[in-house]
Image (cartoon, rainbow, N blue to C red):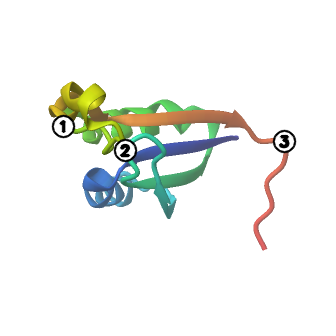
Amino acid sequence: MKLILAIIQDKDSNRLSSKFVKENIRATKLSTTGGFLKEGNTTFIIGIEDERVQKALEVIESVCQSREQYMTSPISVDAVVDSHLNVPIPVQVGGATVFVLPVESFHQF
C-alpha cells in the first residue's frame, strides 16, 4: 500500500476530483496555500494499493498540466533601484507535485 500526496493548482481540482470518482480512486481533498505565488492549491491524499499507483499517477498527469502565468515583483521601498523589476514576468504554474510514500500499516475503523 502507498500514500500519494498530490499538490495541484485549484483550477484543476474539480476536474481531477471528478476523474478520481470515475476511476474509483478514493481521495481526501484539502485546501492549501502555495508558498511561491501565495495562491490557492489543493492537496489530495490518496491511500492506494501498490498495483494501482501507476493508474493514479496517470490520472493526475492527464488533468494537471502546467501553464504560463504572468506576475510582477512585490512593491519595493526603493522604486528608483527596483523600477525594472515591476515588469510582469512569465512563470510556470500548475501541473502537480506528487509524493508517493510507503505505508507501514493501514487501519479503517
Q: Quadrant of residue 86?
A: top left
Q: Quadrant of the C terminus?
A: bottom right
Q: Is residue 85 left or right of residue 103?
A: left
Element assignment for label 2: loop
Q: From what the image shows, is residue 44 above or below residue 80?
A: below
Alpha carbons under labels 1 and 3: distance apart: 40 Å
Indicate which disc, 2 or 3, sits on the residue closer to the N terminus.
2
Q: Is residue 31 left or right of residue 108?
A: left
Residue 13 visible in the snapshot? yes
Residue 37's tag is: 2
Q: Residue at x 37, y 60 (%)?
A: 21
Write down the residue under mark 3. Answer: 104
Write down the residue under mark 1. Answer: 69
Seen as rendered, the residue at the extreme right is 104
Instruction: Decide which of 32, 28 is in the foreground and name it.
Output: 32
Q: Amino acid at mark 1?
A: Gln
Indicate which disc, 1 or 3, sits on the residue closer to the N terminus.
1
Element assignment for label 3: loop
Instruction: Decide which of 48, 73 is in the foreground and name it.
Output: 73
Q: Amino acid at mark 3?
A: Glu
